[in-house]
Amino acid sequence: MTQFFSLAKTNDLHAETEKILENNGKYYLYPESQIPLLVEAGMLRIENEDKERISYSFPSQEAQVFCRNKGHILELYLYLLALESQLFDECMIGGEIDWNGIFPETDNVQNEIDVILRKGRSITFISCKMTDLSVEAINELEVYANHFAGESCLKLIVCTGKINPVYANRCQEYGVLVIRSEQIPNLIPMLKKFSKRFKR
Protein backbone atom coordinates (compact mmCIF):
# COMPACT_ATOMS: atom_id res chain seq x y z
CA MET A 1 0.00 0.00 0.00
CA THR A 2 2.81 2.41 0.85
CA GLN A 3 4.33 1.69 -2.57
CA PHE A 4 1.00 2.55 -4.22
CA PHE A 5 0.86 5.97 -2.63
CA SER A 6 4.54 6.61 -3.26
CA LEU A 7 4.02 5.77 -6.93
CA ALA A 8 1.00 8.03 -7.19
CA LYS A 9 2.98 10.89 -5.68
CA THR A 10 6.22 10.31 -7.61
CA ASN A 11 4.61 9.98 -11.03
CA ASP A 12 1.94 12.61 -10.37
CA LEU A 13 -0.78 10.12 -11.28
CA HIS A 14 -3.38 12.19 -9.47
CA ALA A 15 -1.92 15.59 -8.55
CA GLU A 16 -3.85 17.11 -5.66
CA THR A 17 -3.84 17.83 -1.92
CA GLU A 18 -1.81 15.36 0.13
CA LYS A 19 -2.41 13.95 3.59
CA ILE A 20 -0.33 11.79 5.91
CA LEU A 21 -0.76 8.03 5.79
CA GLU A 22 0.18 6.15 8.97
CA ASN A 23 0.77 2.40 9.25
CA ASN A 24 2.83 0.54 11.86
CA GLY A 25 4.42 3.73 13.13
CA LYS A 26 5.59 4.86 9.69
CA TYR A 27 4.32 7.94 7.87
CA TYR A 28 3.79 8.56 4.15
CA LEU A 29 2.23 11.25 1.97
CA TYR A 30 -0.57 10.18 -0.39
CA PRO A 31 -3.12 11.68 -2.83
CA GLU A 32 -6.24 12.35 -0.79
CA SER A 33 -8.86 11.16 -3.30
CA GLN A 34 -7.50 7.61 -3.53
CA ILE A 35 -8.65 6.46 -0.08
CA PRO A 36 -12.41 6.36 -0.88
CA LEU A 37 -11.65 4.32 -4.01
CA LEU A 38 -9.59 1.79 -2.08
CA VAL A 39 -12.20 1.52 0.67
CA GLU A 40 -14.97 1.00 -1.90
CA ALA A 41 -12.92 -1.72 -3.59
CA GLY A 42 -12.51 -3.54 -0.26
CA MET A 43 -8.74 -3.00 -0.23
CA LEU A 44 -8.47 -0.71 2.78
CA ARG A 45 -10.11 -0.15 6.16
CA ILE A 46 -9.93 3.27 7.84
CA GLU A 47 -9.16 2.99 11.57
CA ASN A 48 -8.84 6.67 12.46
CA GLU A 49 -8.88 9.94 10.53
CA ASP A 50 -8.43 13.63 11.19
CA LYS A 51 -7.73 16.66 8.99
CA GLU A 52 -4.12 15.74 8.31
CA ARG A 53 -3.64 12.05 9.11
CA ILE A 54 -5.26 8.68 8.44
CA SER A 55 -4.52 5.36 10.14
CA TYR A 56 -5.46 2.30 8.12
CA SER A 57 -5.42 -1.49 8.09
CA PHE A 58 -6.15 -4.18 5.51
CA PRO A 59 -9.53 -5.98 5.70
CA SER A 60 -7.99 -9.24 4.49
CA GLN A 61 -4.71 -10.99 3.85
CA GLU A 62 -5.53 -10.97 0.14
CA ALA A 63 -5.90 -7.18 0.13
CA GLN A 64 -2.58 -6.78 1.91
CA VAL A 65 -0.73 -9.07 -0.51
CA PHE A 66 -2.33 -7.42 -3.53
CA CYS A 67 -1.62 -3.84 -2.47
CA ARG A 68 1.96 -4.48 -1.36
CA ASN A 69 2.98 -6.30 -4.52
CA LYS A 70 4.66 -3.77 -6.78
CA GLY A 71 3.45 -5.55 -9.90
CA HIS A 72 -0.19 -4.97 -8.97
CA ILE A 73 -0.02 -1.29 -8.07
CA LEU A 74 -0.66 0.12 -11.52
CA GLU A 75 -3.35 -2.49 -12.24
CA LEU A 76 -5.19 -1.52 -9.08
CA TYR A 77 -4.94 2.19 -9.85
CA LEU A 78 -6.43 1.80 -13.34
CA TYR A 79 -9.11 -0.59 -12.11
CA LEU A 80 -10.22 1.90 -9.46
CA LEU A 81 -10.28 4.74 -11.99
CA ALA A 82 -12.53 2.62 -14.21
CA LEU A 83 -14.86 1.83 -11.30
CA GLU A 84 -15.03 5.47 -10.27
CA SER A 85 -15.93 6.57 -13.80
CA GLN A 86 -19.06 4.34 -13.88
CA LEU A 87 -18.50 4.23 -17.64
CA PHE A 88 -18.26 0.46 -17.99
CA ASP A 89 -20.74 -2.39 -17.63
CA GLU A 90 -17.98 -4.67 -16.33
CA CYS A 91 -14.52 -4.08 -14.87
CA MET A 92 -12.12 -6.92 -14.11
CA ILE A 93 -8.62 -6.95 -12.67
CA GLY A 94 -6.22 -9.87 -13.10
CA GLY A 95 -8.53 -11.74 -15.46
CA GLU A 96 -7.32 -15.29 -16.09
CA ILE A 97 -7.77 -16.65 -19.59
CA ASP A 98 -8.19 -20.36 -20.33
CA TRP A 99 -7.05 -21.45 -23.77
CA ASN A 100 -8.86 -24.80 -24.06
CA GLY A 101 -12.05 -24.10 -22.11
CA ILE A 102 -11.47 -26.94 -19.64
CA PHE A 103 -11.36 -25.61 -16.10
CA PRO A 104 -10.00 -26.59 -13.67
CA GLU A 105 -7.22 -28.66 -15.19
CA THR A 106 -3.94 -29.59 -13.47
CA ASP A 107 -1.51 -28.72 -16.24
CA ASN A 108 -3.74 -26.28 -18.08
CA VAL A 109 -1.96 -23.31 -19.69
CA GLN A 110 -3.36 -20.08 -18.29
CA ASN A 111 -2.44 -16.46 -18.77
CA GLU A 112 -3.63 -13.22 -17.27
CA ILE A 113 -4.89 -9.93 -18.64
CA ASP A 114 -4.16 -7.13 -16.18
CA VAL A 115 -7.35 -5.10 -16.65
CA ILE A 116 -10.42 -5.90 -18.77
CA LEU A 117 -13.20 -3.38 -19.36
CA ARG A 118 -16.51 -3.90 -21.16
CA LYS A 119 -19.04 -1.34 -22.36
CA GLY A 120 -21.79 -3.07 -24.33
CA ARG A 121 -19.99 -5.00 -27.08
CA SER A 122 -16.86 -2.88 -26.75
CA ILE A 123 -13.96 -4.65 -25.00
CA THR A 124 -10.72 -3.08 -23.75
CA PHE A 125 -7.65 -5.12 -22.77
CA ILE A 126 -5.06 -3.24 -20.72
CA SER A 127 -1.53 -4.45 -20.02
CA CYS A 128 0.20 -2.65 -17.13
CA LYS A 129 3.99 -2.37 -17.10
CA MET A 130 5.98 -0.71 -14.33
CA THR A 131 9.15 -1.61 -16.23
CA ASP A 132 10.49 -0.63 -19.65
CA LEU A 133 8.27 -1.62 -22.56
CA SER A 134 9.21 -5.03 -23.99
CA VAL A 135 8.40 -6.78 -27.25
CA GLU A 136 7.07 -9.74 -25.24
CA ALA A 137 4.41 -7.53 -23.64
CA ILE A 138 3.34 -6.23 -27.04
CA ASN A 139 3.11 -9.69 -28.59
CA GLU A 140 1.20 -11.13 -25.63
CA LEU A 141 -1.43 -8.40 -25.72
CA GLU A 142 -1.82 -8.76 -29.48
CA VAL A 143 -2.34 -12.54 -29.24
CA TYR A 144 -4.76 -12.36 -26.30
CA ALA A 145 -6.87 -9.60 -27.83
CA ASN A 146 -7.14 -11.19 -31.28
CA HIS A 147 -7.95 -14.65 -29.89
CA PHE A 148 -10.51 -13.67 -27.27
CA ALA A 149 -12.00 -10.35 -28.39
CA GLY A 150 -11.38 -9.91 -32.12
CA GLU A 151 -10.54 -6.87 -34.18
CA SER A 152 -12.93 -4.57 -32.32
CA CYS A 153 -10.91 -4.91 -29.09
CA LEU A 154 -9.11 -1.79 -27.90
CA LYS A 155 -5.57 -2.75 -26.87
CA LEU A 156 -3.66 -0.59 -24.40
CA ILE A 157 -0.28 -0.83 -22.74
CA VAL A 158 0.13 1.53 -19.80
CA CYS A 159 3.86 1.84 -19.20
CA THR A 160 5.68 3.84 -16.52
CA GLY A 161 9.14 2.81 -17.74
CA LYS A 162 11.16 3.72 -20.84
CA ILE A 163 9.66 3.19 -24.28
CA ASN A 164 12.04 2.19 -27.05
CA PRO A 165 11.06 3.91 -30.34
CA VAL A 166 11.34 0.56 -32.14
CA TYR A 167 8.79 -0.96 -29.75
CA ALA A 168 6.58 2.10 -30.08
CA ASN A 169 6.52 1.52 -33.84
CA ARG A 170 5.65 -2.14 -33.27
CA CYS A 171 2.70 -1.06 -31.15
CA GLN A 172 1.53 1.24 -33.91
CA GLU A 173 1.71 -1.62 -36.43
CA TYR A 174 -0.38 -3.85 -34.15
CA GLY A 175 -2.90 -1.16 -33.29
CA VAL A 176 -1.78 -1.09 -29.66
CA LEU A 177 -2.04 2.27 -27.90
CA VAL A 178 0.80 3.11 -25.52
CA ILE A 179 -0.16 5.22 -22.51
CA ARG A 180 2.67 6.88 -20.59
CA SER A 181 2.40 7.67 -16.89
CA GLU A 182 1.76 11.37 -17.51
CA GLN A 183 -1.16 10.45 -19.80
CA ILE A 184 -2.99 8.31 -17.23
CA PRO A 185 -5.25 11.16 -15.99
CA ASN A 186 -6.66 11.37 -19.54
CA LEU A 187 -7.22 7.61 -19.90
CA ILE A 188 -10.90 7.49 -18.92
CA PRO A 189 -11.94 10.42 -21.20
CA MET A 190 -10.09 8.71 -24.05
CA LEU A 191 -11.91 5.41 -23.43
CA LYS A 192 -15.21 7.28 -23.30
CA LYS A 193 -14.58 8.70 -26.78
CA PHE A 194 -13.69 5.24 -28.06
CA SER A 195 -16.95 3.80 -26.69
CA LYS A 196 -18.98 6.48 -28.49
CA ARG A 197 -17.23 5.77 -31.80
CA PHE A 198 -17.83 2.03 -31.40
CA LYS A 199 -21.60 2.56 -31.06
CA ARG A 200 -21.85 4.25 -34.44
Image (cartoon, rainbow, N blue to C red):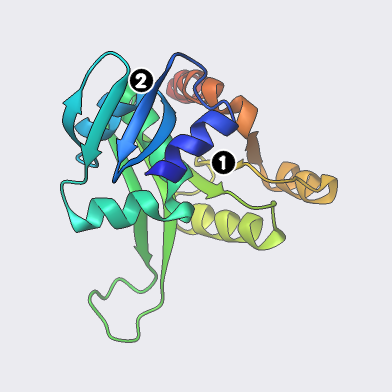
Q: Amino acid at mark 2?
A: Ser
Q: Position of residue 189 (x, y in %)?
A: 49, 18
Please give left or right for residue 86 compared with residue 19 in the image.
left
| Mark 2–mark 1 CB contact (< 8 Å) | no
Residue 121 visible to the viewer: no
Label disc, if present, on residue 33 of the rendered structure: 2
Q: Tell me if residue 166 comes above or below residue 135 in the rendering.
A: above
Q: Nearer the viewer, residue 192 or 73?
A: 73
Residue found 26% across the figure and 82% down from its top: 105
Query: Which quarter of the image is occupied by the N terminus?
Result: top left
Quarter of the image where one finds residue 157: top right
Residue 70 position within the rendered picture, expressed as x and y whole percent measured from the top left: 47, 53
**Could you tell me which residue is drawn at 44 percent across and 49 percent down?**
149
Q: Amino acid at mark 1?
A: Leu
Badge 2 marks a residue whose secondary structure is loop
Residue 192 in view of the camera? yes
Answer above or below: position of 198 versus 76. above
Mark 2 neighbour density, 10 Å: few (under 14) some (14–19) many (20 or more): some
Q: Secondary structure at mark 1?
A: strand
Give the side of residue 40 with respect to residue 195, left or right: left
Where in the figure is residue 90, as x and y percent of width and height?
28, 37
Q: Is residue 143 above or below residue 83?
A: below
Q: Residue at x 65, y 63 (%)?
A: 136
Residue at point 44%, 41% (across, down): 4
Between 64 and 196, which is closer to the camera in this rendering?
A: 64
Q: Residue furthest bottom?
A: 107
| In the image, farthest residue toward the front | 25
Across and down, in percent, residue 165 comes to 84, 45
Q: For this rendering, which residue is in front, 128 or 124?
A: 128
Q: Which residue is mark 1?
A: 156
Q: Tell which circle, 2 or 1, labels the residue nearer the N-terminal end.
A: 2
Residue 111, numbered circle = none
